[in-house]
Image (cartoon, rainbow, N blue to C red):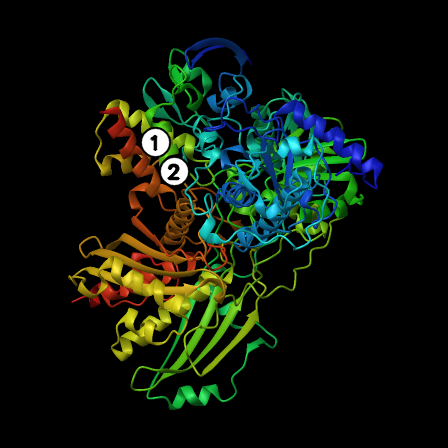
Amino acid sequence: MPQNITLRVNGETKTISADPEEPLLYILRDEFALSGAKYGCGLHQCGACMVIADSKAEPTCLRPCSSFENTEITTLEGLKKNGKLHSVQQAFIDTQAAQCGYCLNGMIISAVALLEENPKPSENEIRTALDPVICRCGTHSRFIKAVKLASQTLNQ
Amino acid sequence: MKELETANASRRSFLKSTGHLMIGFSLYPFASCETKGASLEIPPYEGTPLRPHIDNKLIDSWIRLDAEGYLTVLSGKQELGQGIKTALIQIAAEELDIEPARCRIINSDTGQTANEGFTAGSNSVEGSGKAIRNAAAEARLYLLKLAAQKWNTSPESLTVANGIIKSPKGDEISYWQLLEGKFIEEKITGEAVPKNPSQYKYVGQSVKRDDIQKMVKGESHFVHDLRMPGTVHARIFHPPSYQDRLASIDLSGIESMPGVLKVIKNGSFLAVVAEREYQAVKAREKLKSLAVWNKAPIETPSDQLFDSMKSTAGKPEEVKLSPGIADVIAKAPINHQAEYFKPYTMHASMGPSCAVALWEADLLTVWTATQGVYPVRGTLADLFSLEEEKIRCIGVPGSGCYGQNGSDDVSGEAALIAKEMPGTHVRLQWMREDEHKWEPYGTAMSFQLSAGMDSDGKILAWDTNVWSDSHSTRPNGQAASFVSARHLAPPFPFKKGGFSGGSYRNGIPEYTIAAKQLHLYNYSGPLRTSSLRGLGAYGNTFAMESFLDELIQKSGNDPIDFRLRNLEDPRAKAVLETLAEKTGWKSRQKAAGYGFGIAYSRYKNSTSYFAVLAEVEIDREAKTYQLKKLTGVIDSGLVINPDGLKNQTEGGMIQSASWSMIEEVRYDQDGIKSTDWTSYPILRTIQTPEIEVHLIDRPDTPPMGAGEAAMGPVSAAIANAIFDATGSRIRDLPLKAEKIDWDAIS
């Protein structure tokens, strides 16, 4: 049965009526009209659906929306601050780190979460942080380059 | 220069009405982009009025200047993540001298763009690029003539800077002022001569892609992201296996589920429509649990696939004959024979296929990520027995597809479902298992190669036998090319096409060899197949360049020197020489447990040249190996966008490494067992090798397709590197560590 669920997404709090078991992904796309997080597998295997939940990169395609109550959720759309792109977003543009771009949400979200916790990651730490996200076009080497660039920018 | 008249008034009003709809929602395909560096007096891009495509000989079919201050390019080729939008804009911008930042592009829309068939075979720059270059050059000449007439001077005396024509006397007028809001109705005559590459300003620059800017912000970009008011969500449940057919299902429990608007059962075609996406997902789960199927097993077990291919009945196609070749090989001082194998592999798109369809009376609009909007339209026309003019297919980017993934099928299915929901936009997305189980795979292939060499290491004869299923079952105007049309009652019968060129692509070596022969056995295999990046070139090049390496090892030659001695084309030699120079090939340090592998090919024997070095390191304790680095050199003629070409080549190299080392579709008699990323793993970031790409720019030669050039050579280079490190020759893909003879390593 639907019940009231209160979610805090990109700094705004909204109460919606939904099946508490409904995965957060569908709520974000249907109720919040956000397109950043995407359906990729519905199995928490590919990372297309990631958001930052209390500073951790989390998949959303299986995990019930109700479990995200009292959590600070940031989506790709919410990374911009004062009209300025996050350093990771800018680095992805600067290195042209995309082909089809379907994985960008997971890659950028994972990179932002990594850099918040570890501002100067080694290449191996970057690889490990991006590993949960599938990329089929083979853009991995550019993602690694982009995260290194973002780390440099953030530490300037 | 006048208001264009169209012959078919009803068609025109249809286009107008759907165009209106489009503008009302998300401006697709008039996607507005952020302008970079455009000065303040330029108005925002308003889009160009919707005008149906009439004839590809009209300038207006490719180039439009009716949005004040902007150039709009039209192309029948789809953006697949290869950056084609940017490359085509650069080409048009160059000929018309307008900054790329003031150019927009509309791709793949049967309501507006030319019929350019499929976006395939890496030929978008060669095909669409050429048409756009010519149209833009004609438009420029036309405009210069118009201005010259106005100022009573000659077109040759005029110059253009960013869309403003200037005369020697100081007169100035912009293209848009000159056209006074009308559009160019002239034909492409061939009179205009495109610019000389030495004058290029925008072509050859690494112009950044606008779509990446949008995507990093999470803006709507993919067909998956389209949101029309009142859109409802659909899911389909495909049969558990190819030939399974529905025995029975009780739908009553599904129809009463929350939000469910419709449950569709037509033969074995089962679908649900719901208000919310998650409700459709839940209803699909219920369909899956309630449906009872008549099972039909897959007849060729996977462990007998190789033998089944080799026992293909009937005469082979004689692609190239060389009478007496067997004798030459038998009598040669060095001769060798080997067999290779490639399994079924997936496109495995990261986003399961999606489409949106809308029926308004008997008019159908489909928003689709297909590689061919016109072929899909023709196939929809057959499916619904409807005139093509009543169908509009609008191309919207999908998740990377690399050939025919599920995008065509899902477009047909969305239209079938939407038919039951007239007046409503129906969005259908496949689930992960739909994509993994139902996409048409890149076919399994077998190769038997034999060759003879003289004692100086010169190859005398090279004989190839190839066994392959079809590399193209794309939509062809027959409804059954949409897989679900085969499940309807009554089913549409499916016939495989006769195209076999994909099967022997790159099968005949371009090395200097007096006697070459190739036979193709057209095999009809157990799994659904169609076009996957490179088609047969991937497997053929794996076999050829592995086999060549075997000959090189047998005759004690150097892999680069040997290839250089046996190639005549200076451009082929140049990619290998550049590779040797960039990697320090001659001074490489041979260490135990470390291997170097070389491979080369010219894609389709006629387009881009690509040479690659693979480096692997083995771990004898763990009995594994790691691909450490790939270095590639590519010559694809004139380079339109250097960073874009590098990006495509890097992506091809990494994707091929994944195919070659890890991937193979698993199945048994009950159906496909590779249903997700655990049962069909692909390369992830931790395993990704270091990638280095070098370009050879040839401004004086035409640009050539590059997106598929790396696929074949990378596979052979890795196999050759594994041999170099371990002495084990793996001839059947994927190149799994367990196939290495670890006990034989000294």
Q: Amino acid at mark 2?
A: Ala
> Outermost residue, front direction?
B169
Q: Residue at x 44, y 73 (%)?
A: B509
Task: Please give the residue where the numbered disc 2 appears in the rendered image.
Answer: A97
Q: Residue at x 33, y 65 (%)?
A: B576
> Does the residue at mark 1 contact the one at mark 2 (Cβ under 8 Å)?
yes
Image coordinates of residue B340 in percent, x first then y, are: 41, 68
Viewer-side residue, B259 vs B428: B428
Q: Residue at x 52, y 35 (%)?
A: B162
Image coordinates of residue B101 in percent, x first then y, are: 50, 33
Q: Quadrant of residue B699?
A: bottom left
Q: Where is B392 relative to B566, above or below?
A: above
Viewer-side residue, B743 vs B456: B456
In this rendering, would B401 be left or right of A112?
Answer: right
Per the rendering, the mark at residue B432 is none
Q: Amino acid at mark 1?
A: Ala
Is residue B137 among what the camera can see?
yes
- Give the letter of the chain under mark 2: A
Image coordinates of residue B246 in percent, x first then y, are: 67, 43
Q: Where is B439 relative to B392, above or below?
A: below
Q: Secondary structure at mark 1?
A: helix
Per the rendering, the mark at residue A91 is 1
Q: Residues within 10 Å of mark 2 (few under 14, many from 20)?
A: many
Viewer-side residue, B403 vs A62: B403
- Mark 1 / mark 2, whichever is N-terminal: 1
Q: Secondary structure at mark 2?
A: loop
Do tags 1 and 2 sit on the same chain?
Answer: yes
